[in-house]
Image: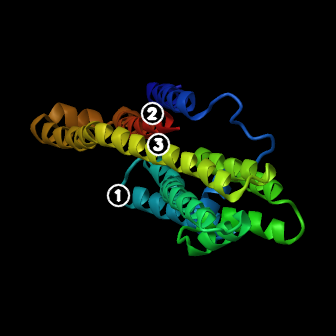
């Protein structure tokens, strides 16, 4: 085996292990195999079938392979193209879940106000869910209301909706609403319960904004370094012919350059993962 092949395998194992150490947590593995992007497509509101999604991914990879062949680049450069669609849909789904979390806070506050004005819990939830503009929050509450309309108890519908959502804060809201429905609390006491829940949600939103604000400086520095390293490499390649020849060799084209790209991408992914874990 050539040194380039051995180096490529070792680098792939190192990068993959570092990502898995943050990406996989105890109890997080699914019981049955499923498409890794299926739930992300649903949360992002993309109404594409998995077949169409794989066709789009295959088209992106094909274009990357053609570009690598046309410009005489190593085939390993097409790996980011294969992961690109999944990264894009995960970023979009995470943004949709964040908007839904904040919409849930407004929904709880509106439900509390409706209860204090004399409305029942199902009426208040139906009204506030219909007024919500975020699909994830609206659909979760509408699912519970539909189950209630079909004869199920409201607390059962809310708990079933809580079990289906992927966001912890939304699940807490639905579970709390389920407790209020199960205990058949009077409107005044249910409103007091939702007032406490709204205060907690508002506190968590302020905490989330503060963590993001404190981490924004480090994120900007990370982006700057991610751009600075390739810029320095380009300058050194122009001024040091030995470095240019080393990067143009088999080792450089198939190990060093793809490895540098993979490590930069892994650094960005892990940094986002750390912030998300702090907010979970």
Q: Nearer the viewer, residue 65 or 51?
A: 51
Q: Earlier in the sequence, mark 1 or mark 3?
A: 1
Q: Are marks 2 and 1 in contact (CB under 8 Å)?
A: no
Q: Pointer 2: residues within 10 angstroms few (<14), some, or many (20+)?
A: few
Residue 99's x, y, as percent?
A: 49, 59
Residue 139's x, y, as percent?
A: 66, 67
Q: Nearer the viewer, residue 248 or 142?
A: 142
Question: What residue does disc 3 label?
Answer: 204
Q: Nearer the viewer, residue 262 or 267?
A: 267
Q: Is residue 47 above or below residue 242?
A: below
Question: What residue does disc 2 label?
Answer: 274
Give the SS element for disc 3: helix
3D distance between C-alphas at marks 2 and 3: 17 Å
Residue 21's x, y, as percent?
A: 55, 27
Q: Residue at x 61, y 75 (%)?
A: 130
Q: Pointer 3: residues within 10 angstroms few (<14), some, or many (20+)?
A: some
Q: Residue at x 61, y 56 (%)?
A: 40
Asked if residue 138 lies left or right of residue 266, the reply is: right
């Amino acid at each position: 085996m050539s040194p380039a092949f051995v180096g490529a395998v070792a680098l792939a194992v190192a990068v993959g292990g570092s990502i898995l150490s943050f990406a996989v947590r105890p109890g997080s593995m699914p019981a049955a195999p499923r498409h890794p992007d299926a739930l992300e497509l649903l949360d992002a509101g993309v109404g594409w079938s998995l077949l169409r999604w794989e066709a789009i991914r295959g088209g992106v990879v094909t274009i990357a392979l053609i570009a690598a062949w046309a410009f005489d680049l190593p085939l390993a450069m097409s790996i980011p193209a294969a992961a690109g669609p999944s990264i894009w849909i995960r970023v979009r789904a995470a943004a949709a879940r964040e908007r839904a979390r904040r919409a849930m806070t407004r929904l709880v506050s509106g439900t509390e106000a409706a209860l204090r004005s004399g409305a029942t819990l199902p009426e208040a939830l139906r009204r506030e869910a219909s007024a919500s503009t975020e699909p994830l929050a609206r659909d979760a509450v509408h699912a519970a209301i539909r189950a209630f309309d079909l004869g199920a108890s409201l607390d059962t519908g809310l708990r079933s909706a809580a079990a289906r959502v992927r966001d912890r804060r939304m699940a807490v809201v639905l579970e709390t609403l389920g407790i209020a429905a199960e205990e058949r609390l009077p409107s005044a006491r249910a409103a007091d319960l939702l007032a406490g829940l709204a205060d907690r949600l508002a506190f968590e939103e302020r905490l989330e904004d503060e963590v993001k604000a404190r981490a924004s400086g480090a994120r900007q520095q990370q982006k700057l370094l991610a751009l600075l390293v390739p810029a320095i490499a380009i300058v050194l390649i122009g001024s040091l012919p030995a470095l240019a020849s080393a990067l143009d060799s088999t080792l450089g084209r198939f190990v060093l350059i793809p490895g540098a790209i993979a490590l930069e991408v892994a650094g960005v992914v892990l940094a986002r993962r750390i912030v998300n874990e702090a907010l979970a």
